[in-house]
Amino acid sequence: MAVASASAALARSVAAGTGFADLLATHLPQARMRPLEATYLAWLDLRAYDVADPAAAGLEHGVMAAAGHDYHPGLEGHLRLNIATSADRLAEIVRRLGAALT
C-alpha cells in the first residue's frame, strides 16, 4: 500500500505542479478527466471534440498518447496520457492536442 500511496501522491503533485487542470481548461476546455488514483497516467475523455481517435490526431501534431480503444472496447474518443514529465513539456503536449482537436 505504501507504493500505491506514494504513486498517488506523486500523480497529484505532478498534476498540481504543472497546472494540468488549467492547461486542459485553456487548450481542451471540453475535455473530461478521470480522477488520478495512484498513477501518473491521465485518462482524457475527448468525445466532445467528435474525433474517434484523438491519439491519432495528436500524433499528427507530434504528440504520442495511447488510444483508449487499445485498452478497452468502447473507449473511442478517449486517450491515455503520461503526465510524468516537465511542466514545460506537458504544456506543449496539451497545446498540441488542443490544436489537433480544434
Image (spheres, grey):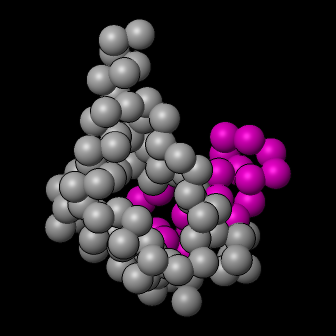
> Where is residue 76 drawn, in percent x and y?
74, 60
Residue 31 position (above or below residue 5): below
Is 63 one of the magenta-colored residues? yes
Residue 25 position (above or below residue 81): below
Query: Is any atom of residue 62 visible in this view?
Result: no
Q: Examine the image and state in which quarter residue 92 appears.
A: bottom left
Is 48 one of the magenta-colored residues? no
> Where is residue 91 drawn, in percent x and y?
27, 71
Residue 100 position (above or below residue 79): below
Q: Examine the image and state in which quarter residue 97 appears.
A: bottom left
The span picked out in magenta is 53-78
Classify the position of the N terminus by image quarter: top left
> Where is residue 37 drawn, in percent x and y?
49, 35
Q: Residue at x 60, y 78 (%)?
A: 30
- Looking at the image, the residue that sits furthest to the bottom is 102
- Looking at the image, the residue that sits furthest to the top is 1
Q: Nearer the viewer, residue 21 or 76?
A: 21
Q: Residue at x 24, y 60 (%)?
A: 18
Q: Residue at x 40, y 82 (%)?
A: 26
Q: Examine the image and state in which quarter residue 50 appears.
A: bottom right
- Looking at the image, the residue that sits furthest to the right is 74
Query: Is any atom of residue 15 visible in this view?
Result: yes
Classify the position of the C terminus by image quarter: bottom right
Count the marks.
Answer: 0
94 on left or right of 80:
left
Residue 46 position (above or below residue 48): above
Q: Nearer the viewer, residue 11 or 100?
A: 11
3 on left or right of 27:
left
